[in-house]
Amino acid sequence: MTCSRRNFLAGAGAVIFTTGVGVNALAGRKTLANTMEDGKKRYGMVHDETLCIGCTACTDACREVNDVPEGVSRLEIVRSEPQGEYPNVDYKFTRISCQHCENAPCVHVCPTGAAFKDEENGIVDVDNFKCVGCGYCLAACPYQIRFFNPETKSADKCDFCKKTNLKEGKQPACVESCPTKALTFGDLNDPNSEISQLIVEKPVYRQKVELGTQPKMFKVPHGKGEIKG
């Protein structure tokens, strides 16, 4: 599915509300993991909201490993309003970060090729040397997660630690630091990978799939209240 730049921009602020896990969010989830047949890797991540305790160890690890300056962040953990009544109060925590879209709007609108998808692993990345600071990618992202790095003077975002931990054969910093194992990272093209098996075994949803972005960030829903798509 191909989305025009106009459609991407129009959908940037779109929010969908469903009660529980909607039919559309789960439809065909057993086939989500394997959509490419060229043998290349296609990295994705699952955030299990039922396991996340909102400790933000992931954000701290990301900042340290990737030298992210103060005042900006590649990922955030957002806490919901209290759910339930005292003393049985609960919270829902969700991850806000790059979705590493198959059909990435930021890549389509970039005039210099600074925003690109690595065809070897599916990671959506930024070439700092090509970025001219036009801000098109920031405006086009429906998830509103890109920012200007005050030190590199270019667009920045999560790259699954491609230049740091992945380069060293490690898992992304956020995954390694999570005390409850709420994050799972791996190759979506490998049906035997932990992430592919998890997507088959558990209910998952992705945000704003109606825009045709085909995000590779999956979430296991908390199960209380409504899910923002």
Image (tube, grey):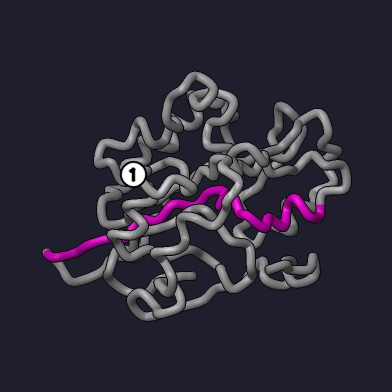
Q: Residue at x 26, y 69 (%)?
A: 83
Q: Residue at x 34, y 44 (%)?
A: 194
Occupied quadrant, residue 71: top right
Q: Residue at x 26, y 36 (%)?
A: 179
User: Which x, y percent locates residue 171?
Assistant: 42, 30
- Amino acid type assigned to the residue bearing label 1 in the image: Glu
User: Which x, y percent locates residue 170?
Assistant: 43, 25
Assign a secondary structure to mark 1: helix
Seen as rendered, the residue at the extreme top is 168
Q: Is residue 72 above or below residue 228?
A: above
Q: Residue at x 36, y 57 (%)?
A: 199
Of 49 and 169, the residue lying toward us: 169
- Is 91 in the magenta? yes
Occupied quadrant, residue 13: bottom right
- Is 19 left or right of 148, judged from the image as shown? left
User: Which x, y percent locates residue 99?
Assistant: 56, 52
**Pointer 1: what residue?**
194
* Magenta residue span: 88-109
- Is 219 in the magenta? no
